[in-house]
Amino acid sequence: MKKFFGLLIVFPVLLVSCGLLGNGNVATETFWVTNFETGAREQIEAELLAQSRHVNIWAEKDSGISRGTAQDIARFYDTLFMED
């Protein structure tokens, strides 16, 4: 499980809670992150690419992560917490 979360961070995907903007645009936020190569703290701008019952998937703008990939990750995460 920890490897999965580490993988998400390495691929600049951030898991936080927030909603979409009311005008239909993708929500954007600025986040403080740690650059694992340099150890430096940096600010990035990220977009909310997917939302599900248990997780929201944020990715750094222009990171190359597609909305489809983010939705796949959200669905996978939700299957880990399915309630019977």
Image: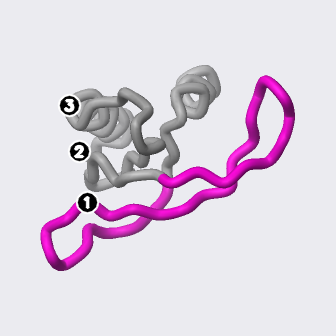
Seen from the viewer's position, the closer of residues 67 and 56 is 67
Instruction: Estimate the spatial distance between the alpha carbons at disc 3 and disc 1, rounded to whole Å.
Output: 14 Å
Q: Are marks 3 and 1 in contact (CB under 8 Å)?
A: no
Residue picked out by circle 2: 84
- Looking at the image, residue 12 sits to the left or right of residue 42; the answer is left
Q: Secondary structure under badge 3?
A: helix
Q: Where 20 falls versus 74 (above or below)?
A: below
Real-space Cα separation, disc 3 to disc 2, in angstroms: 26 Å
> Badge 1, how many Cα within 10 Å: few under 14, some, many 20+?
some
Name which residue type carries label 2. Answer: Asp
Under circle 2, the secondary element is loop
Q: Is residue 46 magenta?
A: no
Residue positioned 61% across, 21% down in the render: 3
Q: Is residue 34 magenta?
A: yes
**Extent of the magenta region:** 16-45
* Residue 13 in the image, given as x and y percentages of width and height: 49, 38
Distance from disc 2 to disc 1, alpha carbons, whole Å, reads: 32 Å
Q: Amino acid at mark 1?
A: Val
- Upstream in sequence: badge 3 or badge 2: 3
Along the viewing direction, whichever of 4 and 81 lies nearer the viewer: 4
Q: Position of residue 78 (x, y in %)?
A: 31, 40
First in residue order: circle 2 vs circle 1: 1
Q: Position of residue 84 (x, y in %)?
A: 23, 45
From the image, which quarter does the N terminus lie in?
top right
**Residue visible at 20% across and 65% down in the picture:** 25
Image position of 9 with respect to 3: above or below: below
Taking the image as shown, residue 74 lies to the left or right of residue 59, namely: left
Q: Which residue corresponds to mark 1?
A: 26
On the image, numbered disc 3 is attached to which residue?
Answer: 68
Q: How is the image coloured?
A: one colour
Is 72 positioned to the left or the right of 36 in the image?
Answer: left
Q: Secondary structure at mark 1?
A: loop
